[in-house]
Amino acid sequence: MASLETIVADIAAEMADAPDRGTVADYIPGLAEIDPARFGIAVIEADGTSHKAGDADEPFSIQSISKVFSLTLALGAIGDRLWDRVGREPSGSAFNSIVQLETESGIPRNPFINAGAIVVADMILGAHEPIEAIGEILRFVRALADDDSIFIDERIARAEQDTGFRNFALANYMRAFRNLRQPVERTLGVYFHQCALAMSCHQLARAGGYLMAGGINPATGHSIVSAQRARRINALMMTCGHYDGSGEFAYRVGLPGKSGVGGGILAIAPGKASIAVWSPGLNARGTSQLGALALERLVQRTGWSVFEAPTE
Amino acid sequence: MASLETIVADIAAEMADAPDRGTVADYIPGLAEIDPARFGIAVIEADGTSHKAGDADEPFSIQSISKVFSLTLALGAIGDRLWDRVGREPSGSAFNSIVQLETESGIPRNPFINAGAIVVADMILGAHEPIEAIGEILRFVRALADDDSIFIDERIARAEQDTGFRNFALANYMRAFRNLRQPVERTLGVYFHQCALAMSCHQLARAGGYLMAGGINPATGHSIVSAQRARRINALMMTCGHYDGSGEFAYRVGLPGKSGVGGGILAIAPGKASIAVWSPGLNARGTSQLGALALERLVQRTGWSVFEAPTE
Amino acid sequence: MASLETIVADIAAEMADAPDRGTVADYIPGLAEIDPARFGIAVIEADGTSHKAGDADEPFSIQSISKVFSLTLALGAIGDRLWDRVGREPSGSAFNSIVQLETESGIPRNPFINAGAIVVADMILGAHEPIEAIGEILRFVRALADDDSIFIDERIARAEQDTGFRNFALANYMRAFRNLRQPVERTLGVYFHQCALAMSCHQLARAGGYLMAGGINPATGHSIVSAQRARRINALMMTCGHYDGSGEFAYRVGLPGKSGVGGGILAIAPGKASIAVWSPGLNARGTSQLGALALERLVQRTGWSVFEAPTE
Amino acid sequence: MASLETIVADIAAEMADAPDRGTVADYIPGLAEIDPARFGIAVIEADGTSHKAGDADEPFSIQSISKVFSLTLALGAIGDRLWDRVGREPSGSAFNSIVQLETESGIPRNPFINAGAIVVADMILGAHEPIEAIGEILRFVRALADDDSIFIDERIARAEQDTGFRNFALANYMRAFRNLRQPVERTLGVYFHQCALAMSCHQLARAGGYLMAGGINPATGHSIVSAQRARRINALMMTCGHYDGSGEFAYRVGLPGKSGVGGGILAIAPGKASIAVWSPGLNARGTSQLGALALERLVQRTGWSVFEAPTE
C-alpha cells in the first residue's frame, strides 16, 4: 500500500481533473458563488498525524454537517431523553420532506434530517436566548477542533433565514404537534446559525476526532462523549447521514459520514482516521459528488471500510 | 475480557431467564407452534473456531435471512445489472409495504424488503423451471454451510403460498411495471421455498462465513464473492437488514445483520466472526426480541461493533 | 332554446371536427384498435323520447361504467351492509392506486375506483360460480336497457385477464386484509367480464334511465331501486365517478356521471334525461376528451346542470 | 308535504332532543366555550321568504364557510387565472393535510382546504395592506347579507394567530414553492380574520343567496357573479366542501355545502333555497353533527336534493 500521504495527494490530483463535478447549490448567493473547481481533503489519523491536499485550509459552509455536533451537544445536555422527540431510523425520503411528520405525529425520523436537527436545536435553545445557544454551539465546535478561528458566516445565516420557508414549515408543523417547545423564530435562529458555521477540511477533520477515538478528543485528551455514545453517533451517521442517499454512501464508501449542502463531508474510520472532504458540486441526493468519490477511493486504497475483513 | 466461550454461554443463560420474549409470528401454523422459550446462538470466529449455546443445533425457518443468500447468488449470476431493477436505500417503511412501489415505478427500495427479494427470485428463476431454481438455491446454501443436511420445509412453503396475499399483491404490482419478468406464480414459488429453508444457528453462522472473511468461505477456502462485493452486501445488511428497524439495530448492535420472521438473525463482524442467533418471539419491527438483545450484549462484551475504535 | 334534437345533432357535428381528440387506451388490442374518429351520443328524456347522433348505435366496451350497474345489483342483494367493506369518499388519486388501501386497512375509498368495484364483484360472486355471477350481471343490464342483444366481449375479457396485473395486485392486497372473501381469480373473472360489456350509447342511456327517474325504469315501469337509493348512487357518481378528475367534471359539466376507459360516459340529469356519449380518445385523467366536452355543451345549452337555478 | 315553516320548526324541535351532538372544537377558547346545546336554522327561499328556528339569530364563528365568500371575491378580482394556483379536485385527506402539497408542487387540491384558502387570501391581499384586505372581505360579506352589523371577532382572530402552527406550516410550505406571493404573516393575518367572521344563520343564509339564484343577490337584485360561476362554485362545494367527508355529505344530503369548525353549514338548493344551520358539536370529519342531520331531514322532507327526480 502506498503511504497515506501519497494516497491523499493522488486523490486530490485525480479530483482536480474530474469532469463530472455535480451541481453547486444555488438557493442562496453565499453558496451559489462558490467555485465548483474547489476540492480539499484532510485526514487525521488516530495518532494525530494529519494529511492535507487541495483546498484543505479554505473555510466553507459546513451546513448539515453541524447536525453531528449539535446532536452531540444536546445528548450531553439532556441525555437519552432526546430520543423521546426524535427517532433513529432512516427516513426513506428527502432531507426536507414533511410527509413523514404528518403520519408520525410530528416526531422526525432521525436527528440528521432537517426536522430532526430543528428539534435538536430547540433542545439546545431551551430557556436561553438564541444568541447564547448559538455561542454555546460555536464554543463547542471550536473546542472540538481546538481552533478559536472558526466562525459563523452571518451573511449565510441571514440568507437562510430569509429563504428557508420549508424549514419554517417544518418547524411550525412540529410546533403544532408540540414537538417544538420554543418559539419557531428563535429555534430557527439557532438552527440557521449552526448551519452557517464556516470551517476548513482540516478544522472539520479535527473536530470529528472524538468519533474516531471512542469519544476522546485525540488532540486534547478530553472526553467528549462515552465510547458507547461515540459508537452510536457513528451508527446514526451510517444509516441516516446522507438522507435518501445513505444506503448508497454505505454501499460505496462504507464509513459513517455526514454531508452538507455546502459540499463538505465528514467521515469517520473508527480507530483509524477522521476525514473531511470538500467539493461544492452535489449529486442528485445533495451529497458532494467529488467528495463521495474521493472517500470511495480513499477507502479502497486504505482498506478502512468498516465492512472490510482486515487482511493480515 | 472473558473468553468468547464464556461470553456465549453467559448470554444463553441470561436469555433463558429473560421475561419479555416478544411475540411469535402466527400467520402460519408452522411458525405459530414454535415454543417461545427456545433460544440458540452460534459464533464462528475467523480462524474457524466455533462456539455454541442453547438450541444452536435446532433447525428453524430462516425466512428473510435467505434474502442474503439469494442476493449473493443472483449477483454471481447476473452481476451489477441486478441494480437496474432493485435499489440500495433503506425503505423507511414496513417489510411488505406497497406504497413505495407506486411512487417509484415498481422498483423496490432494496433487496431485503419482500418486493426486492421477489425481484431477485425472479432473476434467479429466469428461464428455468421453479424446481430447478429452488434446487440451485438449496445447493448454494448447503455449499456455503458445507452441510448437505440443510432442507426446505415444504409444509411452511405451502402455507406461505396459501396465505401470502400481500406477496402476491407485490409481485403482481411489479409485474404491472414490467419489473417482474416471469409468471407471478412461478417467481413466488421460488420465493416461498427459499424463505422455507430450515437451518440451525450453527449452520447459519457457517453459511455466513464468507461475509466475515472477505468473500472467502473460511471452512472450504472457496471464493464465493469478491472482497468488494462482500463489503457491499454487509453495507446493505447494515442499512436495510431489518426493514423499518434497521437504524435501531445499527444503533444498538452496530453490526451488519439480517433478521427473519422465524426469529433468526445472522450478524457479521467483518474479520472477526459470523454469528447466528435464534429466538422465536419478535419485537414490533419483526426482529427477534431476544436475538437482538443477545447480539447487543455480545458486541458490548467483545468490542466487535464496526463503529468501535479498537482499544489497544 | 333550440330543440333538443337540434342540440344533439349540433354537438355531434361539432365533435366530428374537434381537433384535439385525446389518446385512445392502448393497453389491450381490443381497445387500441378503435378508430379515434368515432363519436356517438344518445339522450333519453324523462318521457321516453330519445335523441341520437353520430355512432350512437355502435357497441363499445363500457368498462368502468359497468361499476354503476354492479353497485346497483349488489346493493339490491345485500343492502347497506355493502358499505362496511367500501367507502363513499373521493379518493384523491388515480383509478388504480394501491396507496390508499395500505393506510386504510384494505377498505377502498369508493365503489367506482377499481379496488372498490372488485370488492363489489366479490359480493356479487359470493358462493356462486363465476359464470353464474357474470350471467346475473348480463341479465341485469339487459333488463335495465330492455335489450337482449347486449353482450360481453370475450376477447376483451380475456385480454384484461392476461394483462391486469394491477388489478391482481389490488385484489390480492385486499384479500390480505380479508376484504376479499372469494378466491382472487374467481372474483377478478367476474370483474373482467363485467368491464367487457359491449353496449351502444343508445343502450347505455336506456340502461341509466332508472337513475334519472327516481329508481323506476322509465321504459318498463319496473322499480329498480328506491328513490333514495337512486339519489345516493347519483351522489356517488358526482363525487367519485371520474377518479381524480371528478371535481373537474362536476365543475365543467355539473351532472352525476361515470366514465370508462373505452371512451364512454353515462351522465344523469335527474328528472330530465339519461345521457350516454362515446368517443375513444381520453384526457389525462382517463375520461373521454370529447365525451366530456359534448356533455359540457349539452348542459350549457339545456340548462340541465344540477347546480343551476332554473330560470322561469 | 308539510309547509316549509312547519318543517323548519319540526327539525329544530327534533334537534333540541338529539342525544348525540358531536364534539365542540376546543383548540381555542373562543370556540371551546360555546354551549353544545345551541342549534339554529334559517332558510331563505328563492322568492325571499325566510324561515327561522332555534338560535337562528345568534352570531357564531363561521370559520371555513368564509372560504366560499373569499373564493367568490378573488374570482371577481382576478378571474380564472386563480386556477393556476389552486386545483379543483377533492383532496382525499384532512382539512389541514400537508402531504398532498409535497407531491403536487405546492398547489393545493382545492380552494376549500386550508392550504387552498390561504392561497386565495394571498390573492386578495396582493399589494394591499392586510387591514385593507380584511376590510374588503368584511364589506363584501356585509353586502351579500345586506347587513352591516356583521363583524369580525378579534379575539378569535388573535387566538387563531397564536395557535395556528399548522396553517403557518402550510403557508411557509407553499411559499417555498412560490405559490404564496406575500409575506406569510400578512397573508395569514387576512386568513385568520376572514375565518373569525361572526354571523348568524339568518345572515349566512342571506349571504349565500347569490349561489341559489344564479349569481344574483335575491335581496338586492345585484349581480354578484355570472350564472356559470355560481354553478361552478356550487359544484366545488359539492365535491370539496367538507374535506374528507364531502362524499358522505353528498350521499346523505345531496346539496352543495360548506362547513366550518364553528359548527355552521351553508347549503344551497339551486333555484330553491339558501340554507344555514348551526350546532357547535362536530362529527369525526369536522362537520357539524346536528347540522348535517338537520339538512338531511330538510332535504328528505322538501325533495330538494339535486340528485332527486322531481315528482309531479
Image (tube, coloured by chain):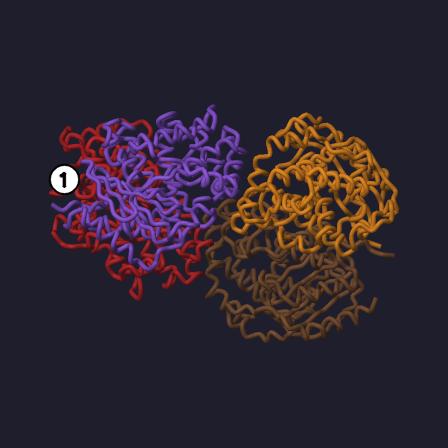
Chain colours: A orange, B brown, C red, D purple
Residue D268, above or below B207: above
Judged from the image, the secondary structure of the residue bearing numbered disc 1 is strand
Q: Answer left or right for C275 relative to B61.
A: left
Q: Answer left or right for C41 relative to D93.
A: left
Residue D208, above or below B35: above
Q: Chain of mark 1?
A: C
Q: Answer left or right for A130 relative to D135.
A: right
Q: Residue lying at the far top in this picture: please name it.
A: D127
Residue at image position (73%, 60%) is B217
In depth, the one of C193 and B97 nearer the eye is B97
**Horizontal and vertical percent position of residue B15:** 69, 72
**Horizontal and vertical percent position of residue C67:** 29, 50
Residue at image position (22%, 48%) is D8
**Horizontal and vertical percent position of residue B174:** 49, 50
In depth, the one of A216 and A239 nearer the eye is A216
In depth, the one of C34 and D117 nearer the eye is D117
Q: Quadrant of the C terminus of chain D?
A: top left
Residue C202, above or below B196: above
Residue C261 visible in the current orientation? no
| Circle 1 residues within 10 Å: few <14, some 14–19, many ≥20 | some
Residue A287 falls in which quadrant of the image?
Answer: top right
Total numbered labels? 1
In depth, the one of B150 and C95 nearer the eye is C95
Q: Amino acid at mark 1?
A: Ser
Residue C20 falls in which quadrant of the image?
Answer: top left
Reading the image, the residue beneath label 1 is C50
Residue C180 visible in the current orientation? yes
**Horizontal and vertical percent position of residue D86:** 42, 34
Q: Answer left or right for A259 relative to C39.
A: right
